[in-house]
Amino acid sequence: MRILITNDDGITAPGLKVLEAIATDIAGPEGEVWIVAPAFEQSGVGHCISYTRPMMINQVNEHCYAVEGSPADCVLAGLHEVMKENLPDLVLSGVNRGNNSAENTLYSGTIGAAMEAALQGLPAIALSQYYGPDNLNLKDPFEAAAQHGADVVRRIMAETPDETSQYSLFYNVNFPPAPADSVKGIRVATQGRRQNTGFSTQPHDAPSGRRFLWIKGGDQRAICADGTDAAVNLDGYISVTPMRADLTDHAILDSLKGINS
């Protein structure tokens, strides 16, 4: 098996090393793992692509490339430049430092990479490691992802149905904020929404007198509906959420038919 991996934390991020180990396990001794990752951190860029400017690509070593662009850019570079002669069988993105559950999903470059791979017609899985007081100070805060990641990916691949949808499936996987031996299992979950929290701004006045705004995240342990991704993560489970790039609210289409003319 040939696997392309990327992330949004950048090519030197520790989570990418974790993902490389997961991918190497899945690919097997006869397989290949290729890395095409951002040269610098690209957290929060979502599905952004560098449409109005070129991006530099640099070969770091065999099967490893750094791209001065977004995670989605990296997938495009991997498929249409680096691996164009022999495309990957699977694209993995992550392992992100911090969760991409609930509303974080909508901002995530980790998710954006998986989405782009799906739009290109390839199986894709995004993996993220929730941080919290039970794992933040571990020697390896990624140990839940490191120990359970390969098994989760294999299970997803084994259960994914054959389909011909215009918008292919991709998956959002989040590992709980817990040591590896405390992980309770896997739960298929819907995307949640943390109540009464969200992103905001925090001002800062520079010595020059200019005013700057930092983007500030919300409470990552805020209440989320039962059975949703963030809720099962905080309960000690790995969440698996199937997704598509189609943003249509199909349930409301019939009730809007009166708009038609």
Image (cartoon, helix red, strand yellow):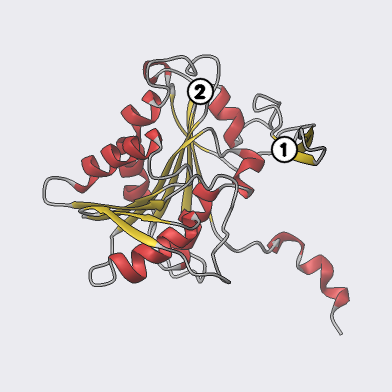
Residue 163: x and y in percent read 42, 65
Question: Is residue 29 visible from the viewing direction of this image?
Answer: yes
Question: Dots 1 and 2: beta carbons under 8 Å?
Answer: no
Is residue 168 shown left or right of residue 82?
Answer: right
Neighbours of disc 1 within 10 Å: few (<14), some (14-19), many (20+): few
Res. 166 mark:
none
Residue at image location 69% in from the left, 32% down from the top: 225
Residue at image location 47% in from the left, 54% down from the top: 71
Q: Earlier in the sequence, mark 1 or mark 2?
A: 2
Labels in figure, total: 2
Closest to the observer, 248 or 44: 44
Residue 212: x and y in percent read 77, 40
Closer to viewer: mark 1 or mark 2: 1
> Which quadrant does the C terminus fall into?
bottom right
Q: Secondary structure at mark 2?
A: loop
Is residue 98 shown left or right of residue 117?
Answer: right
Residue 136: x and y in percent read 49, 18
- Say which amino acid is labelled 2: Pro
Is residue 189 shown left or right of residue 184?
Answer: right
Question: Is residue 242 visible from the viewing direction of this image?
Answer: no
The span from disc 1 to disc 2 (Cα, nearest Å) is 25 Å
Query: Above or below — where is 16 with respect to 125?
Result: above
- Say which amino acid is labelled 1: Trp
Q: Which residue is mark 1?
A: 214
Query: Above or below — where is 188 with respect to 55?
Result: above
Res. 177 mark:
2
Query: Above or below — where is 146 with respect to 137?
Result: below
Q: Secondary structure at mark 1?
A: strand
